Amino acid sequence: MDRKVIKKDSLSSSIAVVVGTRPGIIKFSPVIRALEEQKVDYKLAHTGQHYSYNMDKEFFEDLMLPAPDYTNNNVKEAKLHGEQTAEMLKGLEEAFLDSKPGIVIVGGDANTNLAGALAARKLGIEVAHMEAGLRSDDWRMPEEHNRVMIDHISEYLFPPTENTKQNLIKDNVKGEITVTGNTIVDAVKQNLKIARKKSSIFNNFSLNHNKYFVFTAHREENVDNKSTLEQILDGIDIISTEYNSPIIFPIHPRTEEKIKKFNLQKKADSIKNLQIIEPLGYLDFLLLLSEARLALTDSGGIQEEACVLEIPCVTLRTNTERPETVEVGANVVAGTRPTSVIDSVKEMLIRNKNWKNPFGDGSAGERIVRFLQSRLN
């Protein structure tokens, strides 16, 4: 098979931005806005990892982002990680051959980003990795495989913090490393303003400021294991009894499926104050999180958002690739054992919320775009 490589002199001066998951779209929203404001030529490629573009259309509109230039609707049937990544890689390769971008930027650790980085690398296009250098050192996590591989095949690496920069140096990556801050700070600041104008979440659920908890769980290592998922629900039950406060649980489709599969529906339904609701749109969830008393989650992005919003966080995992949130006192890694979770909740509720945001000044998106422009020029 002939290897197709795009000649350097035929590459355009445009930037290809690869998205495909809702957390990825959120993280890239400040970058896309900076590209628009600075009038940089770019193309937006949507891999369709979580949803088809038609299902995501409202999401782009809510955030006032332009529609993608390329979309892939062939991914939703893929069940396995390899199959899904292959479908996305194939679609992105075709998109890059068509547009011939000078740089492809991916952000984070989802399969979308690995597919984007591999497609660019195979075609001889330079790769930039936003949110580089995160490490959980937990090889049960597909995200850990992805982020390590992307870091090693990227020309330009944008770690959000000094800690993540040191991870890259320790791993002996070959690309150019530039600490930029985390675009989650930009995204929270920019998108919370939109959420306050558009969201009616508090009216919908009759919630009072600082009088409820937010709970999310979706990671494979948690919800694909019956015993672990049961432990998590037991912990939530204890918290419900102890604090007698609403616990809002926007249930991930994966988690809902596993609760049914493991015959845990009765257990979940019996938790007194647990309100299981459909997945929320980003603006609704951001506003919900911003007024919560505490967040319980296994999501890396929510750990960051809670930290920026000054909401105490308890992480339902045995590790985190966001250690900065723990170091500043915004988060505690509790594991999934009920006694550990309840102890962590008690600890976080009495902590002062005067921690310093470790993720930058809210200008990461602009910083990244200026850097990419300088390399293209």
Image (cartoon, grey):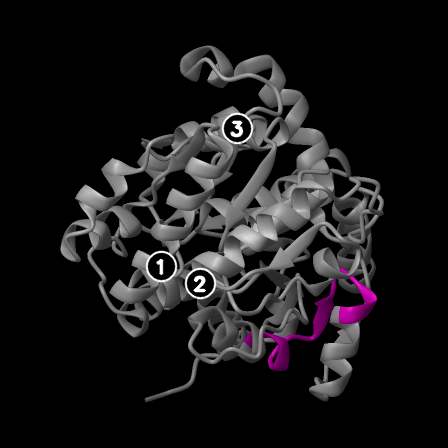
Indicate the position of residue 267 as horizontal and vertical percent values.
Answer: 23, 45
> Badge 3 is on which residue?
212
Picture residue at 30% right of the left edge, 57% below the top: 230
Helix, strand, or loop for circle 2? loop
63 w.r.t. 83: above or below:
above
Q: CA distance from mark 3 to mark 2?
A: 22 Å
Q: Are marks 3 and 2 in contact (CB under 8 Å)?
A: no
Indicate the position of residue 104 as horizontal and vertical percent values.
Answer: 59, 62
For the N terminus, the quadrant is bottom left
345 drawn magenta: no
**Corner quadrant of residue 115:** bottom left
Q: Earlier in the sequence, mark 2 or mark 1?
A: 1
> Badge 2 is on which residue?
337
304 w.r.t. 10: above or below:
above
Q: Nearer the viewer, residue 328 or 159?
A: 328
Q: Nearer the viewer, residue 319 or 136?
A: 319
Picture residue at 72% right of the left edge, 42% below the top: 350
The amino acid type, in three-letter code, at marker 1 is Gln
157 drawn magenta: yes
**Corner quadrant of residue 197:** top right
In-image side of 89 versus 168 (left or right): left
Instruction: Name the disc covering residue 231, or none.
Output: 1
Indicate the position of residue 189 as horizontal and vertical percent values.
Answer: 72, 32
